[in-house]
Amino acid sequence: MKKGFRRIICALLAAASLMLGGCAMGGATGTNTVQGNAALDAGEYQQAQQLFAEAVQNGEEEVLAYRGLGLAYMGLAQYEEAENAFRTALEYTDDHMPENKMDINLYLATVQYRQGKYEDTVETCDSILEENPEGNADVYFLRGASRLNLGEQESAGEDFDAAVALSPEDYDLYLNIFECYSEQNISGLGGEYLQSALNIQGDDMEHYYNRGRIYYYLENYEEAQSELIGPVEEKYEPAMYLIGQVYLKLEDYEHALDMYRQIQDEFGPSTQCYNGLALCAMASEDYSSALSYISEGLALEGTDGEQELYFNEIVVYERMQDFATAKTKAQEYVQRYPSDEAGQKEWTFLSTR
């Protein structure tokens, strides 16, 4: 999955629970729908999918049930199934549900984009803006990203500017725009948005962390490290993870290893930490330790962060020149994450060996 869209999809999924009790739809009362919403909140998308499927079968609140089913498929990166569920949810809405129609249409536009249906995404965003002329930053962003992929650079820039005007202090938005331009090999234009993000005012830990993120994507790792020192000293968890990535980029594997161990000691084990430890081991060609870290990470409960571990497992076996195992792992990976372009490339490469 594209990094920028991993962030926006995670943000949309996190925001989903805020709309579950919307006045127009009403709160969920069906047993499976209530349990499905709880599974969504916990990030247990496979369980949520099963619960919402049962809710649909049992005839529970259709808008909520199909919307939840779409969100579960979205979390599982099964975007075609998600699109079908969101379209069905919309069929059950009426004119008394304008906010909820906009909510579902936004998810619909997101999964259309993930499938490369850029013209459909533009059409869905247009329909949202027709009914809600005041706009929404995510809608303008998705339409701009789609237009950029369609080669409409000028209109894409207008949409991105409109998004930023609506959410001028949203660091994720600036980073998403940057990555859209980077994917089109015009990162210079995207860099202008990141420079603008550095003008956001704030002196708390979150602002220092976010400025560190901006410098990280600008590949100015020394400045990133400088911004992150304060939050790291205060044990601000996101900053500790990010400075670990900075150390990896600087090839300072000793400090990276130490940071990931500090995070484990302070906050407990996580897939993200084990992935960082595996990257440190891979850099020193200690592939046995790398596989051990990956195995420990995959043994943790939940699915958050698993994708990176599975991908790096393929890379480790490649570097060990165990291409047979790497090929098997790559095949399993593309079955789990069929929309991931990097995984498809690895599978294609290994299939030829």
Image: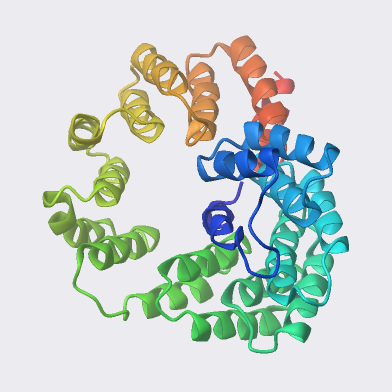
Q: Position of residue 68 (x, y in %)?
A: 69, 49
Dividing the picture into quarters, in which one does residue 295 lie? top left
Left or right, 341 with respect to 311, comes to right
Nearest the viewer among 329 and 286 is: 329
Q: Identify whether 149 is placed above or below 258.
A: below
Q: At 53% from the left edge and 14% from the top edge, which residue is drawn?
A: 321
Locate the C terminus and report the quarter of the image it occupies.
Answer: top right
Q: Position of residue 99 (x, y in %)?
A: 68, 74
Q: Identify whether 42 is placed above or below 168.
A: above
Q: At 61% from the left edge and 73% from the top edge, which residue is drawn?
A: 141
Nearest the viewer among 254 and 53 is: 53
Left or right, 317 with respect to 57, comes to left
Q: Position of residue 209 (x, y in %)?
A: 27, 60
Task: Find the residue positioned furthest to the front.
Answer: 29
Q: Identify whether 206 is placed above or below 257.
A: below
Q: How is the image coloured?
A: rainbow
Dividing the picture into quarters, in which one does residue 16 lie? bottom right
Left or right, 300 with respect to 34, comes to left
Task: Find the residue positioned furthest to the bottom.
Answer: 133
- Please state the total of marks drawn on the protein image: 0
Q: At 38% from the left edge and 11% from the top edge, which residue is drawn?
A: 288
Q: Position of residue 284 (x, y in %)?
A: 30, 23
Left or right, 345 with respect to 203, comes to right
Dividing the picture into quarters, in which one does residue 326 lie? top right
Nearest the viewer among 319 and 34 is: 34
